[in-house]
Image (spheres, rainbow, N blue to C red):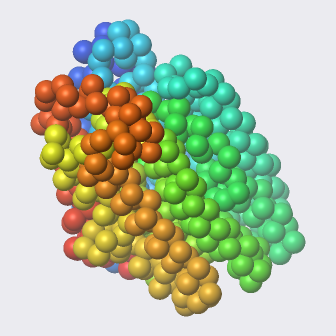
């Protein structure tokens, strides 16, 4: 990496976003794409230059920031964060490319907020100073709120944005109290994460601090039962925002568990481990998310709850407290960040062609749209964990790690693997191969009428531009599924 290369990974989207907001739509789109491409190139360069034999942070940048508080501008990447930085840049580029330019002057503002959110999430993954981490944590939420409020879909975008903000604000305020407690109750007297880890507070204080941070992170993931904001926010979010929202933002909470909860608070982490609180919440989320996905007729809500179920595997891997489970959690963060955005893209294109999100209104699309059907099949198989595709690798590693910790929890977690094929294949088969007669549809002739007019129009299949958006995601599903060493070899320390 070049000097200040990590700084450029977060600063370039922020500066670019501010400039894009002032430009007319077509210029804003081109500049946004340029910024996103350069950011992805920098992130990929960091992953390529990363040395798996070196323990600790690499490419570090450290400058005194607030000397009175011993806070530093301290950036670095290690095996936990390096691939998440690349994922953030990749999904950011796809989200920018997926943004239409037909929104008039508002297009530039939307793209600007999208880039600002990408910069904030990059900062979360790069920060080695706890106070700096908090600044980026809050910074990524502000553009998300405005995009939900001003560009949200459906009848209640303001309600969805306020619900999202209230949940996350409650967690953020608790985390701020925890950060103040870390400064006063640990021997580090700084916000440097390695220093804090080396100067543990007393067990009782650690438990209180652990609880304050954990609430913020379980809301962000989200972990059952702190997922109340999820459905409304995902359903209301416009598609380009939803790609980054679902593909990356939830990973900031899981990443923070690995980065902060586990190394900084040894005693309460073990306390919760012995009582199995966090692992049981993870398994409950796997099961609850899958059941809710089965009950949904709204396509976006179905994918949202499937996302909740799969995030449960990540949390279970983190709190298995063994190397295999935690490495599987990191792999699964990347996998989830590839699969869920692809599903939301496909759902958006289905809605564009049919004018409805009602699953029961879809039927017989495969003969009319064979390319879309083929891509949809691959993504659906990846989502349900088919061997040879990426999700199988991460889930298998997590379950092996969970088995070492608790065979009972590992067996219960497999319920998600049983239910996932049911709701994913029902979605795929129902949309692509259901009979095209009104009598056979759940909503009868009303369902046929809702979709038939759009399907009768020519050129409904995916075009080259849409395939180009999905191509890197689908390609990586195969690459990681067949050659997971590409990710895991950087995790050996």
**Residue at the spot 80% in from the left edge and 68% down from the top edge:** 206
Rendered image quadrant of residue 410? bottom right
Q: Position of residue 359 (x, y in %)?
A: 42, 43
Q: Position of residue 373 (x, y in %)?
A: 21, 49
- Residue 408 visible in the displayed image: yes
Q: Position of residue 319 (x, y in %)?
A: 61, 75
Front residue of 360/203: it is 360
Q: Is residue 265 above or below residue 128?
A: below
Q: Position of residue 158 (x, y in %)?
A: 63, 24
In the rendered structure, the answer to whether residue 457 lies left or right of residue 109 reads left
In the rendered structure, the answer to whether residue 61 lies left or right of residue 204 reads left
Front residue of 57/378: it is 378
**Residue at the spot 46% in from the left edge and 72% down from the top edge:** 417
Front residue of 169/280: it is 280
- Residue 128 visible in the displayed image: no
Residue reaching furthest front? 439
Quarter occupied by the C terminus: bottom left
**Residue at the spot 53% in from the left edge and 48% down from the top edge:** 296
Q: Exactly how many numbered labels are in the figure?
A: 0
**Residue at the spot 61% in from the left edge and 82% down from the top edge:** 409
């Amino acid at each position: 990496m070049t000097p200040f290369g990590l700084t450029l990974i977060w600063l370039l989207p922020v500066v670019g976003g501010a400039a894009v907001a002032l430009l007319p739509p077509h210029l804003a789109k081109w500049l946004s794409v340029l910024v996103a491409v350069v950011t992805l190139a920098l992130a990929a360069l960091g992953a390529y230059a990363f040395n798996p034999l070196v323990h600790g942070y690499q490419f570090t940048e450290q400058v005194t920031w607030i000397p009175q508080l011993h806070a530093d501008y301290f950036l670095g990447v290690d095996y936990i964060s390096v691939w998440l930085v690349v994922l953030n840049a990749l999904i950011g580029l796809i989200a920018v490319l997926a943004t239409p330019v037909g929104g008039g002057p508002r297009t530039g503002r939307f793209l600007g907020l999208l880039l600002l959110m990408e910069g904030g999430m990059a900062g979360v993954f790069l920060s080695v100073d706890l106070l700096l981490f908090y600044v980026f944590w809050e910074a990524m939420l502000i553009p998300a709120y405005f995009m939900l409020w001003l560009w949200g879909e459906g009848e209640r975008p303001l309600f969805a944005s306020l619900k999202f903000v209230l949940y996350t604000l409650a967690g953020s305020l608790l985390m701020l109290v925890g950060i103040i407690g870390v400064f006063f109750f640990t021997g580090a007297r700084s916000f440097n994460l390695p220093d804090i880890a080396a100067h543990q507070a007393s067990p009782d204080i650690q438990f209180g601090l652990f609880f304050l941070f954990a609430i913020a992170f379980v809301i962000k993931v989200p972990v059952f039962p702190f997922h109340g904001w999820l459905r409304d926010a995902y359903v209301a979010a416009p598609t380009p925002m939803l790609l980054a929202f679902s593909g990356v933002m939830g990973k900031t909470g899981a990443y923070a568990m690995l980065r902060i909860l586990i190394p900084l608070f040894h005693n309460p982490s073990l306390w919760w481990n012995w009582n199995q609180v966090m692992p049981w919440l993870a398994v409950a989320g796997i099961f609850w998310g899958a059941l809710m996905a089965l009950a949904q007729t709204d396509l976006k809500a179905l994918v949202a709850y499937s996302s909740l179920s799969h995030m449960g595997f990540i949390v279970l891997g983190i709190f298995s407290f063994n190397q295999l489970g935690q490495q599987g959690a990191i792999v699964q963060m990347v996998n989830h960040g590839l699969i869920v955005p692809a599903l939301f893209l496909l759902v958006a294109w289905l809605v564009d062609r049919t004018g409805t999100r009602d699953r029961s209104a879809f039927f017989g699309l495969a003969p009319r749209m064979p390319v879309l059907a083929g891509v949809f099949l691959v993504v659906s198989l990846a989502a349900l964990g088919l061997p040879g595709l990426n999700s199988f690798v991460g889930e298998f590693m997590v379950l092996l790690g969970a088995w070492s910790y608790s065979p009972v929890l590992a067996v219960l977690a497999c319920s998600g693997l049983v239910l996932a094929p049911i709701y994913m294949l029902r979605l795929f088969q129902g949309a692509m191969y259901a009979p095209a007669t009104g009598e056979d549809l759940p909503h009868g002739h009303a369902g046929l009428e809702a979709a038939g007019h759009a399907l009768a129009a020519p050129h409904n299949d995916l075009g080259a531009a849409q395939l180009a958006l999905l191509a890197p995601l689908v390609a990586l599903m195969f690459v990681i599924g067949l050659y997971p060493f590409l990710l895991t070899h950087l995790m050996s320390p």
